[in-house]
Amino acid sequence: MLAKIRNILGRKPAKIEHSLENVPEVKHFRNETVEQAGKRIRSPDSLKKDINHNGHFRVIARNDEEAESIGKENLKSSSEKKTVLYGDDNISGYISGDRYLKFLTLTRNGDIFSTYPLFSAGKPTPARLTNITECENSYEGQLEIFLNGSAISFFDTLYFANKNKYYPGKDVKVLLSGVAYVLTRARKAPLAEKKSQAVPKVLGEMELATRYENGDLDDYIFRGIVKGVKEFRIREKKAYVIKTSLKTGIDGDHTDFYICATENAIQEKVRVGDHISGIVWMQGFIVE
């Protein structure tokens, strides 16, 4: 998947109209804590191989070697930490980075086993948990939720801390956001095409998130309209918080949705009102 995406990416950073003054964020950890994991309510619905996050880091890193080094750097510069005790396993999460894109490194008894980008812009929205997929390492997972009339899956950035509390049918509040592999301005369909019965309704509206067939459960093709943009810097690269709307089904309601796009992922000038499309990594966490 990443090989195809790299062919789309441009070398020059985008020029973007800045319009987003305040970006809502939710902290992952309220303070440095150590807690005992409770008894597991329900086993996961399915298991999968561990996720290789090097591909997710390619939106920041120049190569896989640089991506792997970020985890080690993160431990030295972390500003937030949470440890959960699971029997003989002490699982700790370390967060580092400035606003808005951060990094989370997971350790098991002091040894690093995973690091991934963390983007937490947005506001929690009500949803219902419908399916739980757990990785072989037992502390990373993907959740499926029922949101605004449709199902959507995402990588749970706090699975290591909350996994024992999950069960299908649980009503939750979810902070859902996206990290763009690639993002471009989308062609607006001419009025004549919009009225044509040959053109699906969703293409006329250009606001929809659908599963990317060549990706993982949490990779989506996204179409939306830009409502606001804010520039920031991450590891000496330009990056942008883009506010848009998320719609997971033709008849579903719209939800405010924030996408992080680095200069590796965006190659065109984007303004408020533009139609955008691309491939995003859907991530989030349950807000308690």
Image (spheres, rainbow, N blue to C red):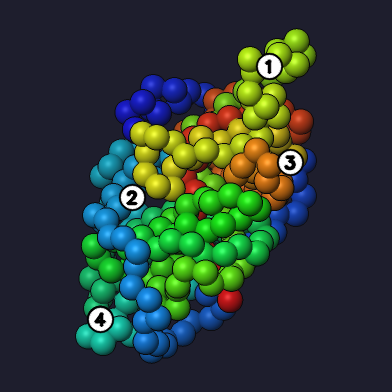
Q: Nearer the viewer, residue 182 or 15?
A: 182
Residue that badge 3 annotates:
228
Q: Using the image, tell me which numbered label, if any, was put on residue 53.
A: 2
Q: Quadrant of the N terminus?
A: top left
Q: Secondary structure at mark 1?
A: loop
- Residue type at mark 1 is Gln
The quarter holding residue 156 reads: bottom left
Q: Residues within 10 Å of mark 1 (few under 14, many from 20)?
A: few
Residue that badge 4 annotates:
89
Q: Using the image, tell me which numbered label, if any, was put on residue 254.
A: none
Mark 3 / mark 2, whichever is N-terminal: 2
Q: Nearer the viewer, residue 107 or 274?
A: 274
- Residue type at mark 2 is His
Q: Do the CB atoms of the residues marked 4 and 3 lie less than 8 Å apart?
A: no
Q: Quadrant of the C terminus?
A: bottom right
Q: Nearer the viewer, mark 1 or mark 4?
A: 1
Mark 3 / mark 1, whichever is N-terminal: 1
- Residue type at mark 4 is Asp
Residue that badge 1 annotates:
197
